[in-house]
């Protein structure tokens, strides 16, 4: 991370390490300077660490650089978020922070509640975000001088999803992305942690003109298999994408989805929608039943779908199998029919992020309605079922390796949101129906309809 900053000739360095811990990152930066890696005449470090129990270790890490008279280290125990906000807002009694030339961060990861003091403080300076790590990055970026650089190691969750869109817009409006390093494994780079998503190291330069982006990848933190490629920015953030998703290509070659002229349609073009399953079980607990009865309809969880088939009812799942159909639940139910469903969460061990299945009315011959639990995404037409061929065609398409590889370029964690599925490009409706008819006719597992067929769609 210390090596990712580009060289700047002469002058003074004002370094920010927000969430400094025991000083590993600050020490690496100062080590590079001491070895001649920077031309700074003077370095002043502000190391923020709110956990006072770490201060002795932090001070010890920085102690050996006291021999250099042109290094000044300040260990600060105050809350970085509130201190930075007060300084940026120019509060009357706030201690003004300097404009830093460099920032190096391994920020804390913790959700910020919508009613928390942090959330209201961040809004004072125009920052809307849902996690401390993105708050630290946004504040640090705001504290940089023009052309100041920031290097941070963070979860990849900010790259996609609706909750991080304000943060993505905040960053992209103020800085250029210089480099992204992707750790390809969720369990090797940080094997001592319970990592549910990939981590990235991102390098930003405030106020710079955006040009090509360097993307490096490695399996783990040894960097033994690191690969480096350059990409035009329009392959990182697609022009016209209202969500401003940040894609991380792992190969300079265009994937099968990008190459295909036939796969360029949105769900709106096709005339279908995808929604998060509307049944939130803990809110409707009194209406849930373990075993179906005369006053219930099927309630479907992700665990009811296995190997492209529906396993319902299943009393061994330790989940309700039914929901009462009454005036209170009716608005959460869909008519029985054909639907394509995608699990919202995959396990770390699964090879695929997107796991699609088909709901068929024959599986529930006596049911007039169905309940879809909140951990499923449901493809539908106006909250009604699809045609059989369209439902099978959607599942066949979504389960291909090509879709999985394309999806991983902007999604680096275990969650698959409805917003993510809306941003995927699809074949047109006619081609999806043809794909579905082929699937039903051959009665093969959906993935057996190969990725090679994708490039032949519409020809």
Image (tube, rainbow, N blue to C red):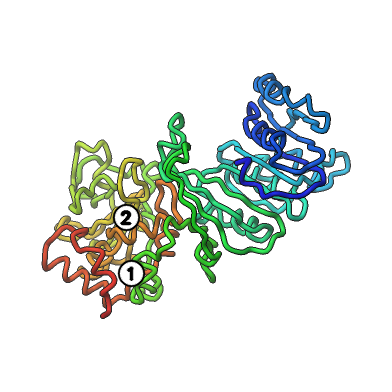
- In contact (CB < 8 Å): disc 1 and disc 2: no
Say what secondary structure mark 1 lies in. Answer: loop
Q: Residues within 10 Å of mark 2 (few under 14, many from 20)?
A: many
Q: Residue at x 49, y 43 (%)?
A: 199
**What label does residue 381 carry, if any?**
1
Left or right position of 1 against 219: right
* Residue 313 percent coordinates (x, y): 18, 45
The number of discs equals: 2
Q: Quadrant of residue 239?
A: bottom right
Say what secondary structure mark 2 lies in. Answer: strand
User: Where is the N terminus found, in terms of image quarters?
Assistant: top right
* Residue 459 percent coordinates (x, y): 26, 80
* Residue 81 percent coordinates (x, y): 70, 39
**What label does residue 342 carry, if any?**
2
Q: Earlier in the sequence, mark 1 or mark 2?
A: 2
Q: Quadrant of residue 381?
A: bottom left
Q: Residues within 10 Å of mark 1 (few under 14, many from 20)?
A: some
Q: Is any atom of residue 124 visible in this view?
A: no
| Foreground pick, 244 / 277 | 244
Instruction: Using the image, determine if residue 397 lies above or below residue 328.
Output: below
Instruction: Using the image, determine if residue 297 lies above or below residue 155.
Output: below
Instruction: Using the image, determine if residue 341 lies above or below residue 111.
Output: below
In the image as oriented, which residue stretches furthest toward the bottom? 459
| Foreground pick, 123 / 9 | 9
Q: Is any atom of residue 384 visible in this view?
A: yes
In the image as oriented, which residue stretches furthest toward the left? 442
In the image as oriented, which residue stretches furthest toward the right? 92
Q: Residue at x 44, y 43 (%)?
A: 197
| Foreground pick, 276 / 140 | 140
């Amino acid at each position: 991370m210390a090596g990712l900053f580009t060289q700047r000739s002469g002058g003074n360095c004002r370094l920010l390490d927000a969430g400094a811990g025991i000083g590993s990152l600050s020490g690496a930066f100062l080590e590079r300077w001491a070895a001649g890696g920077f031309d700074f005449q003077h370095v002043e470090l502000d190391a923020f660490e709110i956990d006072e129990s770490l201060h002795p270790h932090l001070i010890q890490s920085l102690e050996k650089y006291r021999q250099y008279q042109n290094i000044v280290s300040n260990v600060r125990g105050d809350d970085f978020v509130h201190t930075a906000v007060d300084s940026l807002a120019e509060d009357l009694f706030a201690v003004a922070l300097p404009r830093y030339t460099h920032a190096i961060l391994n920020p804390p990861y913790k959700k910020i509640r919508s009613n928390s003091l942090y959330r209201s403080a961040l809004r004072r300076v125009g920052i809307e975000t849902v996690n401390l790590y993105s708050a630290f990055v946004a504040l640090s970026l705001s504290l940089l001088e023009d052309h100041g650089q920031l290097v941070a190691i963070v979860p990849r969750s900010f790259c996609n999803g609706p909750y991080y869109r304000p943060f993505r817009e905040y960053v992209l409006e103020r800085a250029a992305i210089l480099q992204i390093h992707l750790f390809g494994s969720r369990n090797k780079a940080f094997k001592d942690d319970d990592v549910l998503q990939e981590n990235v190291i991102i390098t930003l330069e405030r106020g710079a003109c955006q040009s090509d982006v360097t993307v490096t990848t490695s399996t783990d933190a040894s960097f033994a298999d690191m690969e480096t490629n350059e990409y035009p920015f329009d392959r990182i953030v697609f022009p016209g994408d209202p969500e401003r998703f940040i894609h991380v290509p792992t190969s300079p070659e265009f994937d099968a989805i990008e190459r295909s002229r036939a796969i360029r349609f949105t769900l709106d073009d096709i005339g279908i929608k995808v929604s998060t399953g509307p049944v939130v079980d803990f809110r409707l607990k009194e209406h849930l039943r373990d075993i179906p009865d005369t006053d219930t309809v099927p309630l479907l969880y992700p665990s009811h779908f296995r190997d492209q088939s529906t396993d319902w009812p299943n009393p061994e799942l330790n989940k309700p199998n039914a929901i009462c159909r009454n005036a209170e639940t009716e608005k959460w139910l869909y008519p029985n029919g054909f639907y394509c469903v995608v699990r919202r969460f995959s396990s770390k061990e699964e090879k695929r992020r997107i796991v699609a299945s088909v709901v068929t009315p024959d599986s529930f011959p006596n049911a007039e309605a169905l309940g879809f639990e909140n951990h499923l995404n449901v493809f539908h037409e106006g909250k009604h079922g699809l045609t059989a061929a369209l439902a099978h065609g959607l599942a066949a398409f979504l389960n291909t390796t090509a879709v999985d590889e394309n999806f991983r370029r902007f999604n680096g964690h275990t969650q698959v949101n409805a917003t993510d599925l809306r941003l995927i490009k699809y074949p047109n409706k006619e081609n999806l129906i043809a794909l579905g008819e082929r699937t039903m006719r051959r009665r093969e597992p959906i993935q057996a309809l190969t990725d090679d067929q994708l490039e032949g769609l519409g020809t």
